[in-house]
Amino acid sequence: HGQYATRYYVVIAEAFLPAGMALLAASLAMLFLAYGTSAPALIGIVFAGYTAHFAIKAGLILGQNGFIPPLLAGFTVPVLLFAATACVLYVCARQARGR
């Protein structure tokens, strides 16, 4: 029962992952690339996307084995992606006002 519920929530959450990853990448690019950022910052942007992919798979495994509730396993990563995007956009807005 827990395996199917977890998979169900993860499949629904995976519909939001591309949008969340694209928004996070775009906001990180606005923050870092606007000022001529070095290669390590670019690697950080790519690493953020890989981390999100890894985290959704880890959540699936943890949820299917009963370590975390199915709803938490499915929707933690998309919610964190959108929250991180909001934080980065807030920083961008503060930097733009500070000019």
Image (tube, helix red, strand yellow):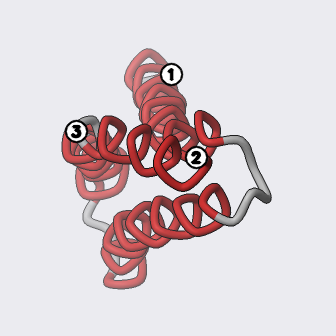
Separation (CA) of disc 1 from disc 3: 31 Å
Q: CA distance from mark 2 to mark 1?
A: 47 Å
Q: Residue at x 47, y 26 (%)?
A: 86
Q: Residue at x 46, y 68 (%)?
A: 57
Q: Position of residue 68 (x, y in %)?
A: 75, 50
Picture coordinates of residue 15, whole percent (x, y)? 22, 39
The quadrant holding residue 16 is top left
Q: Position of residue 30 (x, y in %)?
A: 26, 43
At label 1, the amino acid type is: Arg
Q: Is residue 14 above or below residue 57?
A: above
Q: Is residue 79 above or below residue 94?
A: below
Q: Outermost residue toward the top? A: 97
Mark 2 lies on residue: 1
Q: Which residue is found at the position 50% from the left and 41% from the top?
A: 5
Indicate which disc, 1 or 3, sits on the residue closer to the N terminus: 3
**40 vs 5: above or below:** below
Q: Are marks 2 and 3 in contact (CB under 8 Å)?
A: no
Dot 1 crowding, Cα within 10 Å, few <14, some 14–19, many 20+: few
Amino acid type indicated by mark 2: His
* The image quarter in which residue 89 lies: top left
Name the secondary structure under disc 2.
Answer: loop
Q: Residue at x 59, y 34 (%)?
A: 71
Q: Which mark is residue 82?
A: none
Q: Which residue is mark 3?
A: 15
